[in-house]
Image (cartoon, helix red, strand yellow):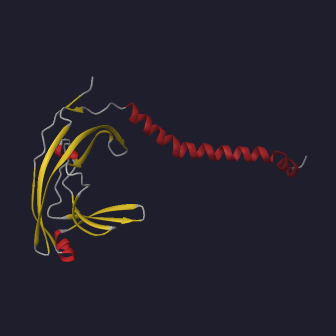
Amino acid sequence: MNIKNMIVENFPAMIKSLLLSVITVFFLIFILPLLAIYISYQLSPDPPLPKVTYGEFPFKLEYSIDGKKFTVSDTLICEYDGIGINEAVGKHRKWKSHLASKNDRITLLKINDSLEIYYSPGYARYYMGDLYSQETYNHMFPDAGILTQEDSRVIYEVISAKDLFSKYKIKLLHWEHTTPIVNHFVLSE
């Protein structure tokens, strides 16, 4: 039997073997590490639970557009939202927040349907006393945010106070907010 006949007769087996090798390599390189990470996150202990799971934080923002002054007073409502898993920090406490006014955010100026200038009152984790030990949080004041919608994507960016005034004639004058609580965290039983 010559080599050509051996190759022709064994061609389906060679293809199966090559395909199986490619699938095995793909599994070992891509799937197995992700599976190991997922399993290790699932087996890791849950973070301690917060003693305080709900808080209301009144705030007031004063700003001007072209010299005309505006004041926004509202309340940020923060609630514990369970345990989440994130590749960067593993298992962590999740928080959600919304404004009492039912607005999505503090809109300073809506330019059009795809561009809006806004101010963020801050994160629920900050107000609920759940920052990591080395982590600090600074409000964006006197800077603001720009929300841009492109197709189905929403992009949030920070705009400096200088650019905010030079491009849109908006100046943030005063930001008054409630201080965060001191929360305590306990292991679940």
Task: Give the residue at x 43% y 38%.
Answer: 38
Left or right of residue 1, residue 89 in this image: left
Residue nearer the viewer, 14 or 114:
114
Q: Residue furthest front?
A: 101
Q: Residue furthest top?
A: 189
The total number of labels drawn is 0
Residue 182 in which image quadrant? top left
Left or right of residue 6, residue 160 in this image: left
Residue 50 in which image quadrant? top left
Q: Residue furthest right?
A: 1
Residue 174 in which image quadrant? bottom left
Task: Give the residue at x 24% y 48%.
Answer: 98
Task: Give the residue at x 47% y 42%.
Answer: 34
Percent x, y of residue 144: 20, 64
Quadrant containing the C terminus is top left
Percent x, y of residue 83: 32, 36
Percent x, y of residue 8: 84, 50
Q: Is residue 67 above or below residue 43?
A: below
Residue nearer the viewer, 35 or 69:
69
